[in-house]
Amino acid sequence: MTAMLVDAHAHLVTDDPAYPPSPAAGTPAGDNLMTAERLLDALRGQGATAAIAVQRAHVYGYDNSYVLDSARRYPDRLRAMCVIDAQAVDAGRTVRELAARGAAAIRLTAPGGNRFSGTPGADWLAGAEARRVWAAVSETGLSMCLHVYRWNRGDVLRALPAVAREFPDVPVVLDHVAALDVEEPPPYPEADLLLALAELPRVYFKVTTLNFARILAAGRDPEPLVTWLAGHFGPDRLLWGSDVTQTRGTYDDMWAIARRAVSGLPGPDAAKILGGTAAGLYGLRPAGDASGTANSA
C-alpha cells in the first residue's frame, strides 16, 4: 500500500457567517483562518493525502457543524473530530447524534481549560456521565481523543488505565503526548505514568507542533522525543498533527519540523508516524486504493 501523509490534528476556522463563533471567541480573520479548502491546498503542497479536522472549541464551543460539514464535503480527504461536554446529562445521546452526522472521533477536555478555572480530578473522562460517553463511543465505533494539560496530567494518566480496560475496543489518543514536559531531555517528569500505558495496546500518542515548539524554544532538537516515544510504544501507536491555527507558525514549517523530528527513525517507522497510524485509525486510504484501511489499527 502506498504510504500516506496525514495531518492528524488540524483545527479548521472559517469566516463563513453560516458558522458563527461563540460569543467569547471574537471574529476569526486573517492568519487565524484555516478553511477546509485552504487546508486541502496546504496538504497538496506537502504531498499529503488527508487530515483530521479537529473542532476548535475555543472558537466554536460544542457546535461541531463546520468540521462535520467539511468532512462530508471532502470524505476522501477529511475526518471530523468533535468536542463534547462529557459531563452533560445527554452526552451519550450527543455522541450517537454526532456519529450519525459523520463524526470519526470524540474529543474530551477538562472543563475550564486551565489550572485556575479548570475542574480538578478526572471526572470529565472517568466519572459516571463520562462513562456513558465511552459506552456510546464503543457502540458507534468511534475513537476517543483526550486533551490533557500539565496541571491535570497526573490525574488523567492515573485514571485512564481503568477506563481503557473497561472499554478495550475504543482506541484512545492522547493529544500533545499528554502535555509531557519535553523541554529537558528524557527521562521526562511523570514519564512513569505515561510509560505505564505501554501495556494498553489501544492507547495512542499524538505528538504535535506544540510539543516541538516547546523543545525548540528550549534550544533542543525534537528528534530525541520521537525516538524515545517510538522506543517505548512503537511507531504503530504514534501519530503527528500540526495543531495549525492553535500553535503559531506556517503550515510548511510545521511539516518541516515534523520531518526533522522523525529523521532518526527507519523510513517505514517515520512513515507510520507521519500518516500510516492515523490512516489506519481513522479509516483513510490513498487515492486509487480500493482495499481500504478502516479501523485497522
Image: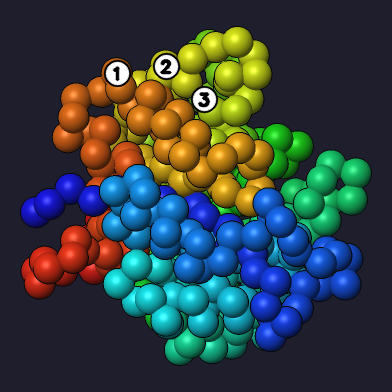
Which numbered disc flags the more N-terminal residue, 2 or 1? 2
The N terminus lies in quadrant: bottom left
| The disc label shown at residue 192, or none | 3
The secondary element bearing badge 3 is classed as: helix
Q: Quadrant of residue 257?
A: top left
Residue at 42% across, 62% down? 40
User: Which corner quadrant of the image does residue 156 belong to?
Assistant: top right
Q: Amino acid at mark 2?
A: Pro
Name the side, left or right, on which 196 lies relative to 133.
left
Which secondary structure, mark 1?
Answer: loop
Residue 224 visible in the shown view? yes
Cβ atoms under marks 2 and 1 closer than 8 Å:
yes
Q: Residue at x 57, y 49 (%)?
A: 244
Q: Nearer the viewer, residue 73 or 149?
A: 73
Which mark, by number, is residue 224? Answer: 2
Task: Check the image and report above or below for 251 versus 97.
Answer: above
Q: Residues within 10 Å of mark 1 (few under 14, many from 20)?
A: some
